[in-house]
Image: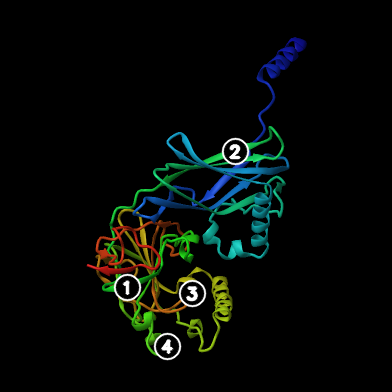
Amino acid sequence: MRMKFAAAFLLALALAGPARAAEPTIRAYPAGPLYAWPLDSLRGVQSLLLQNAAVINTTGAPMTVGSVRFELLRGDQVIETRVLTGLDVERLARSGSGAQAAGMIDVVGFQFGDVLGEPAAKLPATPTLAPGEALLITSQVFSWSGDRDALRITIAAAAPGAATASLTLPVRTAQPQARYRFPMQGRFYVQAGASLHTHHRWAVPEEFALDIGQLGEGLTSYRGSGQAFTDYLVYGQPVYAAADGEVVKVLSDLPEDPAQFRRPGETQEAYFERIQGWQTALMVRGTDALGGNVVVIRHDWGEYSVYAHLKPGPPPVTVGARVKAGDLIGRVGSSGSSTEPHLHFHVCDGPDALDCVGRPTAFTNIENPFALMPGPIQSGDVVVTK
């Protein structure tokens, strides 16, 4: 009887074939959907940024990442393909390992979310991953004309026939419904928006954020020397709720630091170097130090509007208050990581100003007098409220 059982067991194994090897895991942050933003509304050119993805070795054995393939899809059809191999994969490994060793992934945890898992996987300096180690993939930019529905990421190990894995993320190209009113009234200069050549687009929570200021004579944002907060045209101007909702966070007692201003005679290079050190010190103190005085409002459709770098002082709203679009919620200041007075505004998916994922925003009450056609706000635009 035992011999018959053993023979039957061996026959079953033979029919089943070799055991399937465990696959590596691919994670992304944000986990999707990914939102495109127009590069050129007139010509229908879109841009997409994959902020972070990670290949985590969950195979139980060492593996070497041989290639990372990105495919933009329309329906089931592959429209465009990009493949990273060799030196490109090695650069990713070195970059991620260096950032982790320097502590930057911990300091700006809001940028990476849970992409490396919990606890965070170790990032080696080569594409060869021990079990549990990972390869971090950051800042992959794509552009196209027409429609795209998804981005598929596929990784393959270097050895022929070795482990592969893929992850497909939905892509949304349609502009969002215009639910918000511009949070200030008048004519304003948008120093930074969602355009790729300014800093917002590269940070997960503020990918579609706006830095709002004003320009005066000589295209400067200030009168006089620009060494006092009150020199700036936008300083102290009222900030209004962009939509109806409930106030879920208020900070109002964080100071404004005049060290942020460029000093008379200071070269641009010296200024940038000094400011980078100043901002790094703020990062170490946490996300509240970066945002400064802030109001966050929850809206009924599940989004949160964030108003940051506000002027210190008794706030006109408190946590738990219901506000209507157009209600006064604060005044423009320069608290937190702010190099000069301005309003930082963004919409995201959570109540923390930075520990969230940014969402595109459209406004009901603005015009761009210098645009060739209506379209979303880009860095450098001048907008006028209606």
- 96 relative to 170 in the view: left or right: right
Label 4 SS? loop
For the residue marked with disc 4, what is the amino acid? Ala
For the residue marked with disc 1, what is the amino acid? Phe
Which one is earlier in the sequence, the residue at label 3 or at label 2? 2
How far apart are labels 3 and 2 at the CA level?
40 Å
Q: Is residue 338 visible?
A: yes
For the residue marked with disc 3, what is the amino acid? Ser
For the residue marked with disc 2, what is the amino acid? Ala
Q: Which residue is mark 3?
A: 337
Q: Which residue is mark 1?
A: 188
The reply to whether the C-beta atoms of the residues labelled 4 and 1 are less than 8 Å apart is no
Q: Which residue is mark 2?
A: 165
| Residue 228, disc | 4
Q: Where is residue 54 drawn, in percent x and y?
A: 59, 49
Label 2 SS? strand
Q: Where is residue 220 drawn, in percent x and y?
A: 39, 81
Dividing the picture into quadrants, the one containing residue 180 is: bottom left
Q: Is residue 122 visible?
A: no
Mark nearer the viewer, 2 or 1:
1
Which one is earlier in the sequence, the residue at label 1 or at label 3? 1
How far apart are labels 2 and 1 at the CA level?
47 Å
Which one is earlier in the sequence, the residue at label 3 or at label 4? 4
Mark nearer the viewer, 4 or 1:
1
Which one is earlier in the sequence, the residue at label 2 or at label 1? 2
